[in-house]
């Protein structure tokens, strides 16, 4: 609908009509320009930009239709004024143009087609999901699905919004006719209703005022508001949100199917060069946690540095064939040992088939001590595991951000997240990687050979390490890992705040979206991220984190990492006063 006051004291002027059309065109252009600028700023590939431009053009169809509608209305007003305004020298009352666009069905579906469509909906939207969910042996999720089906049937086939909308249109039309307004119809799909308040309509105007005293327009306005609340923009917004989440989950599922569950690492590891030194706190304060305490050491000479655990966390991405070589390069020959035999022995005994990779690193100079390094996200199924474990926490974090004084609800969010996790099926819960790590820790403890254990990991591996460490009561150090404070009651067994605060530590880079998931415990370390602002995921990179810690804390006789000075990371070169060869040349020779 479109209402325009075309004559009288409050009539729409020519410049106002032109400015409305111009604003609509400029607004559509600015929306399109801002989208393209954002895509270019984020360094999106040209093919993806072209695809998004095409989608945006489809989304701009309603705006284009609105511009055409305004243009046609403008022309209609001008034509009407040319024909009618010449007969009236002065207008004491305002004349209104009511322009309505109605859509008519040209063809009517047959009963057979309707029953076929209904049968397909029942089969593919009810029976097939119902049988699939019953196969999971989870009564809760089946009951919830049936409840949603009943509500959907009521909403879809007994939609009160459609009834109210049609009654509202009919009531408005009948009211206007009853008040003596004149309707002009044409052969097109657009009905133009001209409402004029001429001086000789005094009796009908009096009747209009009498009706107004009975609040008829207020009732109609309230009816229109009910229609807007029930089926207007709020419904569209929530529909778009569910569609977006559905597309994201579908992409993750397809990626998981395409990438498979191969856990063998293909990464050959970082390139390292000895005798080059990063001194701590070169241009700012060093991080207070650069040196780890509480007796967590890899040698009797010094405490373990934060750099050591960061390196061990990202070591799990390397190919198992070169893991021992990379340990010898970083710690020195014979200092650290990759005990893959223990990992494989436990896997065979526990019959673990989950797609997760983890290493067990021991230090012969320190009997009883070992570090479990858990691999982070490596394929599509890992992304699905992330979504399964922390999607509820992300949802409540967004809800907390939108609510005024949202922090006051923290005390109940963990219970709500736990309630949501109750509908998780047993087959899905087996993908919870932390259970494997917790079982492996129990396996090591039961042998009495290893009494001092630490678990670490990056990304999903860091979140898994935090959960398993809190459950097992051993130190856990995550690098860019999701946290566990809000979702602590959703794990099996659940965590306590004391477990998280006492046993977990997370390294959180700036602008890292993964490390922002859930709330951290008492112990964590924020670190800088030197990546460009338009690269959203660069701060989550494992190499960038180890370079930042090495540059800020110093490398403490560990080898310098060549990737830190490349074009992606751009850290300054380490110093080597006793060597004539610069670091870049040494790295080139090491690669060769």
Image (spheres, rainbow, N blue to C red):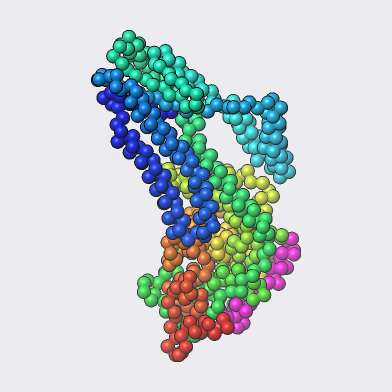
Residue 344, magenta (yes or no): yes
Looking at the image, is 67 positioned above or below residue 245? above
Q: Which residues are magenta?
A: 324-351
* Quadrant in which residue 358 is drawn: bottom right
Q: In x, y percent, where is residue 2?
A: 41, 29
Q: In x, y percent, where is residue 48?
A: 53, 56
Looking at the image, is 275 positioned above or below residue 2? below
Q: Say which of 362 and 168 sits in front.
A: 168
Identified at 68% across, 28% down, the residue is: 114
| Horizontal relation, residue 287 to residue 49: left or right | left
Identified at 49% across, 30% down, the residue is: 230
Identified at 68% across, 63% down, the residue is: 262
Identified at 37% across, 32% down, the residue is: 74
Looking at the image, is 8 positioned above or below residue 33? above
Residue 546, magenta (yes or no): no
Quadrant holding the N terminus? top left
Q: Say which of 96 and 406 sits in front.
A: 96
Q: In x, y percent, where is residue 211?
A: 37, 13
| Horizontal relation, residue 41 to residue 206: left or right | right
From the image, give the main secondary structure of the stretch colored magenta. helix
* Quadrant in which residue 198 is drawn: top left
């Amino acid at each position: 609908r479109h209402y325009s006051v075309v004559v009288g004291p409050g009539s729409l002027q020519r410049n106002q009509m032109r400015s409305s059309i111009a604003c609509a065109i400029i607004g559509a252009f600015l929306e399109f320009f801002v989208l393209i600028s954002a895509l270019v700023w984020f360094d999106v590939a040209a093919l993806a930009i072209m695809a998004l431009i095409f989608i945006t053009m489809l989304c701009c169809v309603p705006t284009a239709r609105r511009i055409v509608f305004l243009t046609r209305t403008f022309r209609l007003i001008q034509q009407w004024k040319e024909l009618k305004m010449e007969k009236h020298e002065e207008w004491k009352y305002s004349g209104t143009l009511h322009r309505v666009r109605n859509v008519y069905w040209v063809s009517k579906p047959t009963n057979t087609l309707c029953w076929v469509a209904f049968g397909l909906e029942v089969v593919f939207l009810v029976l097939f999901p119902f049988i699939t969910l019953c196969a999971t042996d989870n009564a809760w999720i089946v009951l919830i699905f049936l409840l949603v089906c009943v509500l959907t049937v009521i909403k879809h086939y007994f939609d009160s919004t459609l009834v109210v909308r049609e009654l509202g249109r009919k009531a408005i039309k009948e009211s206007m006719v009853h008040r003596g307004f004149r309707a002009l119809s044409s052969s097109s799909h657009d009905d133009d209703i001209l409402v004029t308040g001429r001086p000789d309509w005094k009796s009908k105007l009096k009747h209009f005022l009498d009706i107004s005293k009975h609040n008829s327009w207020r009732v109609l306005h309230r009816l229109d508001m009910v229609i807007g609340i029930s089926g207007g923009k709020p419904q569209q917004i929530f529909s778009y949100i569910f569609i977006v989440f559905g597309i994201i989950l579908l992409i993750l599922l397809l990626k998981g199917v395409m990438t498979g569950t191969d856990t063998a690492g293909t990464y050959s590891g970082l390139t390292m060069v000895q005798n080059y030194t990063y001194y701590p706190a070169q241009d700012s304060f060093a991080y207070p946690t650069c040196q780890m305490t509480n007796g967590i050491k890899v040698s009797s000479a010094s405490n373990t540095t934060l750099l050591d655990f960061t390196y061990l966390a990202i070591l799990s991405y390397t190919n198992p064939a070169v893991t021992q070589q990379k340990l010898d390069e970083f710690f020195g020959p014979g200092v650290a040992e990759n005990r893959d035999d223990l990992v494989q022995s436990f896997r065979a005994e526990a019959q673990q088939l989950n797609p997760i990779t983890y290493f067990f690193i021991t230090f012969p100079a320190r009997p009883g001590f070992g570090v479990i390094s858990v691999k982070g996200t490596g394929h599509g199924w890992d992304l699905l595991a992330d979504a399964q474990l922390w999607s509820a926490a992300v949802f409540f974090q967004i809800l907390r951000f939108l609510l005024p004084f949202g922090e006051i609800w923290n005390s109940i969010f963990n219970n709500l997240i736990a309630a949501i996790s109750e509908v998780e099926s047993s087959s899905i819960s087996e993908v919870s990687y932390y259970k494997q790590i917790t079982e492996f820790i129990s396996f090591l403890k039961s042998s009495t050979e290893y009494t001092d254990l630490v678990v670490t990991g990056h990304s999903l591996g860091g979140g898994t390490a935090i959960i398993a460490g809190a459950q097992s009561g051993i130190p856990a150090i995550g690098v860019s890992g999701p946290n566990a404070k809000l979702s602590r009651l959703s794990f099996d067994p659940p965590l306590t705040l004391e477990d998280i605060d006492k046993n977990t530590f997370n390294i959180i880079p700036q602008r890292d979206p993964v490390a922002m998931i859930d709330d951290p415990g008492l112990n964590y370390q924020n670190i800088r991220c030197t990546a460009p602002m338009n690269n959203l995921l660069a701060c989550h990179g494992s190499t960038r984190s180890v370079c930042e810690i090495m540059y800020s804390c110093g490398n403490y006789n560990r080898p310098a990492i060549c990737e830190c000075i490349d074009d992606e990371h751009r850290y300054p070169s380490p110093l080597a006063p006793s060597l004539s060869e610069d670091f870049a040349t040494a790295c080139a020779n090491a690669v060769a």
